[in-house]
Image: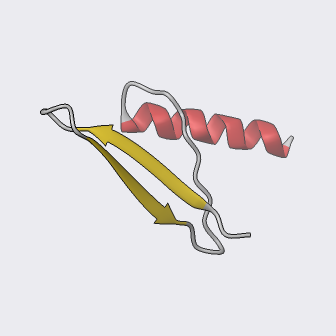
Amino acid sequence: MTRYLIRTLTDSTGHPFTHVTKARENETFTVVEAESKEEAERIFNERAVSEWI
């Protein structure tokens, strides 16, 4: 089955937009909450390592 990432955002006028991205066969999407890109990557890596153990 094909996987899709669906993102919704609201512009400054309050109009919502939806963007759909098709994942490639060798691609996955992970969402993490973080204050920065660096923190998001650290959180992702910590989760990935804990899943390998």
- Residue 41 position, x and y percent, is 50, 41
Residue at (57% x, 32% y) in the render: 43
Left or right placement of residue 40 versus residue 26 in this view: left
The image's colouring method is secondary structure
Quarter of the image for the C terminus: give it. Answer: top right
Q: Is 11 in front, or is 32?
A: 11
- Residue 49 position, x and y percent, is 73, 41
Q: Quadrant of residue 50?
A: top right
How many circles with numbers are drawn on the protein?
Answer: 0
Q: Is 25 in front, or is 39?
A: 25
Left or right placement of residue 18 versus residue 51 in this view: left
Seen from this angle, which residue lies furthest right?
53
Residue at (65% x, 35% y) in the render: 46
Left or right placement of residue 40 versus residue 19 in this view: right
Seen from this angle, which residue lies furthest front?
15
Seen from this angle, which residue lies furthest left?
13
Q: Is 53 in front, or is 13?
A: 13
- Residue 10 position, x and y percent, is 27, 36
Residue at (60% x, 66% y) in the render: 27
Q: Is 51 in front, or is 8?
A: 8
Residue at (45% x, 27% y) in the render: 34
Quarter of the image for the N terminus: give it. Answer: bottom right
Seen from this angle, which residue lies furthest top?
35
| Vertical side of 12 occupied by 21: above or below | below
- Residue 47 position, x and y percent, is 69, 36
